[in-house]
Image (tube, helix red, strand yellow):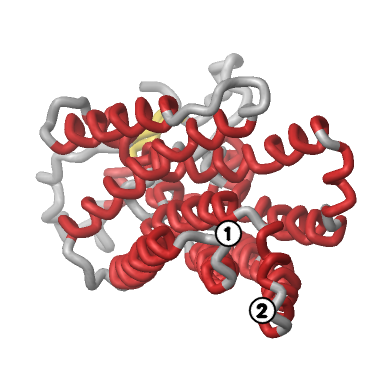
C-alpha cells in the first residue's frame, strides 16, 4: 500500500545486514497509514495530535445506582485508567475530609438536647422530656442504622462514621426518654438490642470478620423494618385529616417479607435481588427526607410550634448535609 509503514519490519530490523533475524515467524503485524504527498485527502496524522487529557473528557463518571452497592466502591472499579497524576487522589482525599468534617455539626446538633435532658433529669423535671417525641427519635435512629449498614458495606469510612455518631447520639436521647418514663421500657429494651447488634455486626462486616450469611440476615432485617416504618410514618403525618390506622405499615411489612423471601429463594432476577438489597438504604434516605415535610405540615396546622424550633439546629443540620454533598458528587452515588 502506498504511504504505509510496517512497525513489524522496524521492530525486527537486524543490527547488521549480515546477521539474519530470528523473529521472522512472528504472526502479529501492526501497520498504520502515513500521510502521502500523492494523497491530498490526508490532512494530518491524528496520532501526532492525540492528547490524553482531551480524550478523558469523553470518559465521564457514570452515576452509581443504589442497586449496584453490592461491591465496595463500584464507581472506581472500572475507572482505574482515568487516574492521571495526583488529581484523582487529591479529590478523593478532599471530599473524604469534607465528609468527615460533617461529624462536628451533627454532633453539635444533638449535644444541646442531650445536655438539656440531663439537666431536667437531675432536677427531677421528667415532664419536660415529654416534649421530645420518642417515636420520631426512634424513626431517626432506624434511618441512621440503615444508612450505616449501607455505607459500611461500601467501605465509605467517613460517611459510616457520621451515621455511627447519629446512632449513638440518638440512642443517648432515647435512653434519657426511657429514664424519664416517656418511652415504654419494652420498646427501649428492644431498641437497645437492635442498636447493639447493629453496631457490632457493622463493625465486624467492615473489617471482614463476619459470616456473609449473618450479614444477609441483618440486611433482610433492616429491609423489612425500614420498608414497614416508612409508609406508617408518612400516614401518621396526616392523622388529623385521615383516620389513625396501622394498615399502611402492615401492608408494607407483608410486601417487604414477601420480597425478601422471593429474593433469597431465587424467584427474582439479578436486578430484582439487587433492588431488594437497596431498599433499606432508600427507605432510610426517604425517612430523613420526610422529616422536614412532617415538620412543615405540623407548622402549617399549628403555627405556634414554630416558636419551639431552633434555627441553630436547622443551620447545623444544613451544614452537615452540605459537607457531604461533595463526596456524593465525587463518587456518583445517588443514595447520598
Q: Which residue corresponds to mark 2?
A: 121
Q: Position of residue 250 (x, y in %)?
A: 36, 30
Label 1: few (<14), some or many (≥20) within 10 Å?
some
Query: Quadrant of the rendered structure where residue 113 is?
Result: bottom right
Residue 317 in the image: above or below residue 293 = below
Q: Where is residue 181 in the image (x, y as percent from the top left)?
A: 54, 66
> SS at mark 1?
helix
The residue depicted at 55 percent of the width and 50 percent of the height is 135
The residue depicted at 78 percent of the width and 61 percent of the height is 316
Q: Are marks 1 and 2 in contact (CB under 8 Å)?
A: no
How far apart are labels 1 and 2 at the CA level? 50 Å
Which label is found at residue 88? 1
The residue depicted at 22 percent of the width and 52 percent of the height is 217
Residue 39 in the image: above or below residue 72 = above
Residue 278 in the image: above or below residue 272 = below
Q: Using the rendered image of the protein, determine whether residue 49 is visible from the camera's viewpoint.
A: no
Amino acid at each position: 500500500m502506498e504511504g504505509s509503514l510496517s512497525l513489524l519490519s522496524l521492530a525486527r530490523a537486524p543490527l547488521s545486514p549480515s546477521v539474519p533475524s530470528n523473529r521472522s515467524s512472528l504472526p502479529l503485524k501492526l501497520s498504520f497509514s502515513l500521510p502521502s504527498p500523492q494523497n491530498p485527502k490526508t490532512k494530518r496524522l491524528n496520532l501526532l495530535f492525540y492528547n490524553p487529557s482531551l480524550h478523558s473528557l469523553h470518559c465521564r463518571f457514570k452515576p452509581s445506582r443504589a442497586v449496584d452497592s453490592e461491591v465496595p466502591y463500584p464507581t472506581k472499579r472500572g475507572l482505574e485508567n482515568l487516574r492521571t497524576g495526583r488529581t484523582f487522589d487529591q479529590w478523593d482525599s478532599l471530599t473524604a475530609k469534607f465528609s468527615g468534617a460533617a461529624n462536628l455539626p451533627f454532633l453539635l446538633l444533638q449535644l444541646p438536647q442531650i445536655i438539656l435532658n440531663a439537666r431536667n433529669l437531675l432536677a427531677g423535671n421528667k415532664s419536660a422530656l415529654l416534649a421530645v417525641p420518642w417515636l420520631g427519635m426512634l424513626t431517626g435512629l432506624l434511618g441512621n442504622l440503615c444508612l450505616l449498614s449501607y455505607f459500611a458495606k461500601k467501605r465509605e469510612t467517613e460517611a459510616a462514621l457520621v451515621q455511627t455518631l447519629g446512632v449513638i447520639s440518638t440512642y443517648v436521647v432515647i435512653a434519657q426518654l426511657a429514664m424519664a418514663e416517656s418511652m415504654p421500657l419494652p420498646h427501649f429494651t428492644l431498641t437497645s438490642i437492635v442498636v447493639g447488634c447493629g453496631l457490632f455486626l457493622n463493625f465486624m462486616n467492615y473489617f471482614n470478620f463476619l459470616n456473609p450469611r449473618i450479614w444477609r440476615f441483618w440486611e433482610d432485617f433492616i429491609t423489612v423494618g425500614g420498608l414497614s416504618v416508612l409508609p406508617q410514618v408518612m400516614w401518621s403525618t396526616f392523622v388529623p385529616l385521615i383516620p389513625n390506622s396501622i394498615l399502611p405499615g402492615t401492608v408494607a411489612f407483608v410486601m417487604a417479607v414477601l420480597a425478601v423471601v422471593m429474593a433469597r429463594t431465587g424467584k427474582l432476577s439479578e436486578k430484582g435481588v439487587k433492588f431488594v438489597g437497596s431498599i433499606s438504604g432508600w427507605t432510610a434516605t426517604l425517612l430523613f427526607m420526610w422529616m422536614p415535610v412532617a415538620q412543615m405540615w405540623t407548622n402549617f396546622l399549628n403555627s405556634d410550634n414554630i416558636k419551639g424550633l431552633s434555627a441553630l439546629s436547622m443551620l447545623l443540620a444544613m451544614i452537615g448535609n452540605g459537607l457531604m454533598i461533595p463526596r456524593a458528587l465525587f463518587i456518583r452515588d445517588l443514595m447520598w
